[in-house]
Image: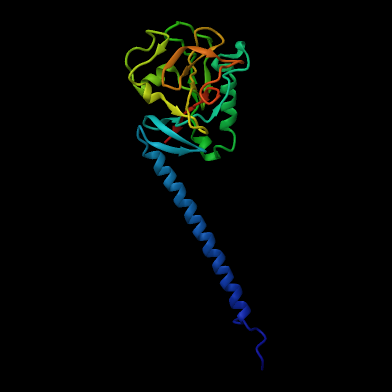
Amino acid sequence: MQNTHQTNTPKTRLIALGFLIILSVLALSLLSCSSKKTTEQETFEKLNVGDIITFGAYQWKVLDVKSDRALILAERSIGEMRYSTSDSMTKWRTSAVRTWLQEHLASNAFNDEERTRAIEVINKPDPNPYYDYVDDDQDVRDRIFLLTAKEVVQYFGDSGQLGTSANLNDQYNANRIIEHSTIDEDHVWWLRTSGRSLGFQPIVTHIGVIYLGGVPAAPPTPDYPGNTRPGVRPAMWIKM
């Protein structure tokens, strides 16, 4: 009698082989994702001051490391823009730069896992160390922000001269210079410290001098080398 239940035909063998191939591909994919996640976790757990890491779409320098977190600063500016849209909005709390950074953190420049690593911190209004002026009286909560002049000195070299003149021009200028992200020029970058008065915002110049008097924060913000606006060089505290 002919057996009508043939279970080992060429067609059956091909189907079984296909299932095996699919299962193998899925297993390798899961293993790869798990390995990548483990590598990323190990990278963040072993951060040291001075390390250069990739976080989101950018390269960052590790400025400080605590037990469970690290302070990172963009190696280059990630954009260039006026600090604010009007003289009355040049406080860090109400600035166009701060608004843009918060929106940028929520953009596709960072994935969901990276956004969860960003730690919310309280930033207080930062008085100008030379002009003894502060432009606000309210704290803000930020997960991405600009450095103050004091923080730049703290992390890039302290000659003890900050606040003794309107310009900090010392032996650490070279440490504070950054390259423009798209053209072959050194780039000016904004600080969040209060300027000499409302409407002026401190910068680090293209030669690394901290200019505490500040430049006009709103239109018309002056052009700099390469016909550029001051750059946005953000910092973040991230979980390790």
Q: Assign the C terminus to one quadrant of the image.
A: top left
Q: Residue furthest top?
A: 132
Relative to 122, residue 130 above or below? above
Q: How is the image coloured?
A: rainbow
What is the total number of numbered labels drawn onto the structure image? 0
The residue shown at (60%, 75%) is 14
Residue nearest the observer in this picture, 79 or 221: 221
Residue nearest the observer in this picture, 173 or 51: 173
Residue 42: x and y, percent?
A: 39, 43
Give the image quarter of residue 177. top left
Relative to 196, residue 41 above or below? below
Relative to 19, residue 78 above or below? above
Residue 66 shown left or right of residue 238 in the figure: left
Residue 34: x and y, percent?
A: 47, 51
Residue nearest the observer in this picture, 170 or 53: 170
The residue shown at (32%, 16%) is 159
Residue 86: x and y, percent?
A: 63, 14
The residue shown at (40%, 42%) is 43
Q: Assign the N terminus to one quadrant of the image.
A: bottom right
Residue nearest the observer in this picture, 161 or 220: 220
